[in-house]
Image: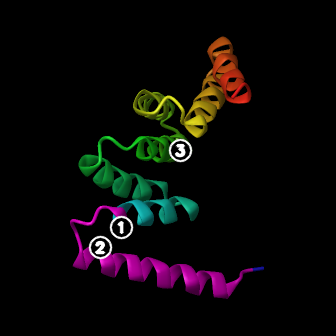
Amino acid sequence: MINYEDILTADHIFNSLNKYIKENPEDYDGYLVRGILYAEYGFFEEALGDYNRYLENNPDKDYIRYYRGIALKALGYYTEALENFTNCLHVNPNNLDALYEKGILLAELGEFEEALHDISDCVNV
């Protein structure tokens, strides 16, 4: 059953974020938040656009590469997703979410030995 209250709430949030970004185009956190919301609702192309805008201005943030990896994986761009998870780990080797997602993706790509290594590292923390 459709929950119309959730739809109205999401619509209100998107409208508020769009207005905020229009009024504050240099506050890149707005793009990050909207990108996360887009991804939450399955709009991965739109999320990726916002993530890219955020990354251009925050290249030292590891989590944006993680979010990009999730979106790219959802869109079927597995090589690019793997690159983003790997780059995330170069910026922050302690990002267990990226390490886990990298391991899962490697397993899906048939790279079982490397996948087992990454997932084992997550468990051994």
* Residue 48 drawn in magenta: no
In the rendered image, the vertical position of residue 104 relative to residue 59, given as above or below:
above
> What residue did someone put label 1 on?
30
Classify residue 6 as left or right of residue 80: right
Tell me what residue is drawn at x 71 percent, y 22 percent.
Answer: 120
* Residue 26 drawn in magenta: yes
Q: Position of residue 91 (x, y in %)?
A: 40, 32
Give the position of the N terminus as an image quadrant. Answer: bottom right
Q: Give the secondary structure at mark 2.
A: helix
The answer to whether marks 2 and 1 mark residues whose Cβ atoms lie closer than 8 Å is: yes
Inter-mark Cα distance, 3 to 2? 23 Å
Q: Range of the magenta residues? A: 2-30
Q: Residues within 10 Å of mark 1 (few under 14, many from 20)?
A: many
Res 107 → quadrant: top right
In the rendered image, the vertical position of residue 14 relative to residue 65, given as above or below:
below
Inter-mark Cα distance, 1 to 3? 19 Å
Q: Give the secondary structure at mark 1.
A: helix
Q: Give the secondary structure at mark 3.
A: helix
The numbered mark, 1 or 3, whose residue comes first in the sequence reads 1
